[in-house]
């Protein structure tokens, strides 16, 4: 008991130690850190421009590494002190922007954006509907920009990609940092260009795209371009959130900084990895010394090291799981200490109690079964499980299946350890899988496996019993013809036939010797094995013993009937084999096809597992497959 509790405490503490640090450390996502450009024309003064979405005070801890080695770098300074911005405001003026006075909100937010710009920053205004129009070329004149934003006529169609290409072409020959801000309330419908060309235009211009809009199905393509070019994508639920979108993008543009360091290599043309880190935020890329790269998309990104542990541990649920494991560890440790100091009752009265009360035999139904619960605490838990299972009617069903499968387990202990195993495995899957949906699927499979295995073992043993039944009846009839009594015949047959028939008959003999009527003991075998054929044989024996007759001839007749029924059953199985194979093939085909697709094209089926609609479709498909398999099974099942 004490050793078991110490093991439980140690395992729980170990699991808590593995889970909780990751949960506490990574519960919140780190602030965004993005490289915008690198000027390495002078290896002795490599200037790295980056965007950091966290607190500026964090930059005091900025670390620069080249080829994995920390290099001495200057203090990060705002980009505005080193380089001005060039921003193309691209605004959707399609008729749909009238809804909810969205265009008025966008123009108001754009005016606020212009009023907050730095004096040296240049802004251009481009509008698009079915056609793209340059309303104002790049200028630092705030008044001219505000006049251009007073009002804009609306038109039909949405040429967002063409507008992005037009804005990108306006950046030629500039020394300022190029940026495109686009606002759209719907997907592209009339562009000559596509998303790939728009992305290439932004990349070639050395810029970044910042996409804004209200939630719509067509926004995903703009989001992809923004993420690929080092920009950002933000959406609002309605027109009321437009001002906040422009404010977020303006903050992102202002949160750009430049840090300078001397390269460890002085030769140009060499490719070296550079990495910036601020606390837990990291960004890296491959740069070429002696060159200048002005766009995030032109930098070959280096993947940041993954945080320790599954992604699930970096969520609040992971934190709660870690705290729960700590609680379990504390409880197990307390119980272990309690057993050390309290210990089992070893008083003289306890030692002499069996001699005073006499020997108490085990319950008949538990006799011969192995006990897994050897500690007092475990026995109390098993007793509570037995009480609950007995009230729900589960205990009798489990006991019957254990008997049919010939597993020497106590039903209450089997139920207790099954439930405990499902809970423990479910918790482990939740930690290791990193996804609640994957953990749920694994938990369902885990919960279904033991009952399925038990049912398979019981069914296999029941079929073996059924196959031995005609031969057993023939042998029993022969013993009766030789002058044996029925009891002597059953005892003789029990030593001759194999398992499982021999075991069941030996149990009948044992029960009969203990005083149970032979017919009742035989009926117990029929009920325990779920064999209607054996039940009919017992019924024939009971009737013969009541009314008289030749029992040997009766048993031979019953055996011949069972043999003919078994032959007919096998004929039916042969005729329905095609239907069974079809059901198996159709049931396994979707699973096999899914495995093949995941192997041939990894990531193609990810939306089915990562998106809510995909998961609903998977569950629905599984239910429909199960219903179809059950239907086909019932169609080919013929009772004999």
Image: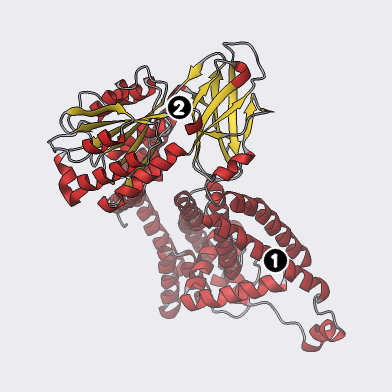
Are circles 2 and 1 on residues that touch, CB within 8 Å? no
Asked whether 418 or 618 is in front, the reply is: 618
In the displayed structure image, the side of residue 315 where residue 210 appears, left or right: left
User: Which of pointers 2 and 1 lies earlier in the amino acid sequence?
Assistant: 2
Any part of residue 553 in sight: no
Q: Position of residue 259 (x, y in %)?
A: 57, 30
Q: Residue at x 55, y 34 (%)?
A: 77
Q: Which mark is residue 330?
A: 1
Determine the image quadrant of residue 348: bottom right
Dot 1 alpha-carbon crowd within 10 angstroms: few under 14, some 14 to 19, many 20 or more: some
In the displayed structure image, the side of residue 307 where residue 200 appears, left or right: left
Q: Which residue is the extreme one toward the right? A: 348
Asked whether 624 or 313 is in front, the reply is: 313
Dot 2 alpha-carbon crowd within 10 angstroms: few under 14, some 14 to 19, many 20 or more: many
Q: Which mark is residue 296?
A: 2
Question: In this rendering, is residue 535 above or below 454?
Answer: below
Q: Quadrant of the C terminus?
A: bottom left
Q: Residue at x 17, y 40 (%)?
A: 151
Q: Residue at x 15, y 34 (%)?
A: 157
Q: Secondary structure at mark 1?
A: helix
Asked whether 71 or 189 is in front, the reply is: 71
Determine the image quadrant of residue 422: bottom right
Q: Quadrant of the N terminus?
A: bottom right
Question: In this rendering, is residue 142 above or below 539?
Answer: above
In the displayed structure image, the side of residue 21 where residue 248 appears, left or right: left
Q: Label 2, label 1: how many angstroms apart (C-alpha)?
A: 50 Å
């Amino acid at each position: 008991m004490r050793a078991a509790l110490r093991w439980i405490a140690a395992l729980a503490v170990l699991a808590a130690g593995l889970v909780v640090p990751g949960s506490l450390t990574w519960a919140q996502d780190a602030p965004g850190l993005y490289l915008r450009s690198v000027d390495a024309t002078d290896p002795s003064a490599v200037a790295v421009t980056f965007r950091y979405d966290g607190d500026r005070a964090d930059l005091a801890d900025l670390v620069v590494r080249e080829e994995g080695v920390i290099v001495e770098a200057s203090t990060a300074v705002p980009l505005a002190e080193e380089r001005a911005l060039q921003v193309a405001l691209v605004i959707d003026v399609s008729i749909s922007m009238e809804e909810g006075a969205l265009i008025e909100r966008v123009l108001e937010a754009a005016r606020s954006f212009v009023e907050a710009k730095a004096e040296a920053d240049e802004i251009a205004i481009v509008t698009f509907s079915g056609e793209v129009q340059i309303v104002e070329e790049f200028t630092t004149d705030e008044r001219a920009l505000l006049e251009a934003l007073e009002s804009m006529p609306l038109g039909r169609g949405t040429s967002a990609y063409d507008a992005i290409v037009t804005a990108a072409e306006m950046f030629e020959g500039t020394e300022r940092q190029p940026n495109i801000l686009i606002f759209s309330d719907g997907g592209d419908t009339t562009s000559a260009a596509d998303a790939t060309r728009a992305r290439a235009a932004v990349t070639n211009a050395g810029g970044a795209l910042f996409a804004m809009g209200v939630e719509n199905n067509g926004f995903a393509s703009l989001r992809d371009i923004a993420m690929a070019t080092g920009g950002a994508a933000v959406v609002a639920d309605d027109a009321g959130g437009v001002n906040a979108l422009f404010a977020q993008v303006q903050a992102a543009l202002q949160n750009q900084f430049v840090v300078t360091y001397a390269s460890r290599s002085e030769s140009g043309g060499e490719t070296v990895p550079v990495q910036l880190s601020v606390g837990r935020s990291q960004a890296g890329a491959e740069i070429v010394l002696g060159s200048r790269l002005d766009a995030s998309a032109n930098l070959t990104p280096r993947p940041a090291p993954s945080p320790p542990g599954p992604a699930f541990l970096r969520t609040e649920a992971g934190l709660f799981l870690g705290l729960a494991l700590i609680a379990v560890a504390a409880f197990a440790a307390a119980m272990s200490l309690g057993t050390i100091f309290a210990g089992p009752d070893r008083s003289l009265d306890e030692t002499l109690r069996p001699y005073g009360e006499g020997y108490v035999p085990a319950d008949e139904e538990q006799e011969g079964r192995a006990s897994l619960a050897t500690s007092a605490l475990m026995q109390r838990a098993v007793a509570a499980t037995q009480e609950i299972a007995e009230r729900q009617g589960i205990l009798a069903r489990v006991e019957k299946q254990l008997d049919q499968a010939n597993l020497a387990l106590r039903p209450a202990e089997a139920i207790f350890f099954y439930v405990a195993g499902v809970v423990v495995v479910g918790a482990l899957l939740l930690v290791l899988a990193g996804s609640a949906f994957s953990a749920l699927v694994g938990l369902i499979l885990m919960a279904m496996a033991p009952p399925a295995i038990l049912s398979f073992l019981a069914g296999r043993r029941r079929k073996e019993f059924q196959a031995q039944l005609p031969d057993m009846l023939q042998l029993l009839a022969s013993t009766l013809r030789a002058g044996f009594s029925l009891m002597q015949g059953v005892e003789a047959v029990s030593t001759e036939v194999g398992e499982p028939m021999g075991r069941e008959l030996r149990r009948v003999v044992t029960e009969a010797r203990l005083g149970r009527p032979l017919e009742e003991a035989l009926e117990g075998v029929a009920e325990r094995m779920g064999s209607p054929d054996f039940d009919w044989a017992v019924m024939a024996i009971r009737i013969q013993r009541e009314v008289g007759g030749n029992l040997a001839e009766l048993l031979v007749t019953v055996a011949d009937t069972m043999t003919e029924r078994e032959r007919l059953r096998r004929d039916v199985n042969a005729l329905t084999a095609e239907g069974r194979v079809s059901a198996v093939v159709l049931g396994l085909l979707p699973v096999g096809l899914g495995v093949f697709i995941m192997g041939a094209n990894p990531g193609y089926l990810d939306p089915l597992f990562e998106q809510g609609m995909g998961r609903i479709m998977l569950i629905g498909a599984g239910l429909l497959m199960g219903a179809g398999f059950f239907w086909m099974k019932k169609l080919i099942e013929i009772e004999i």
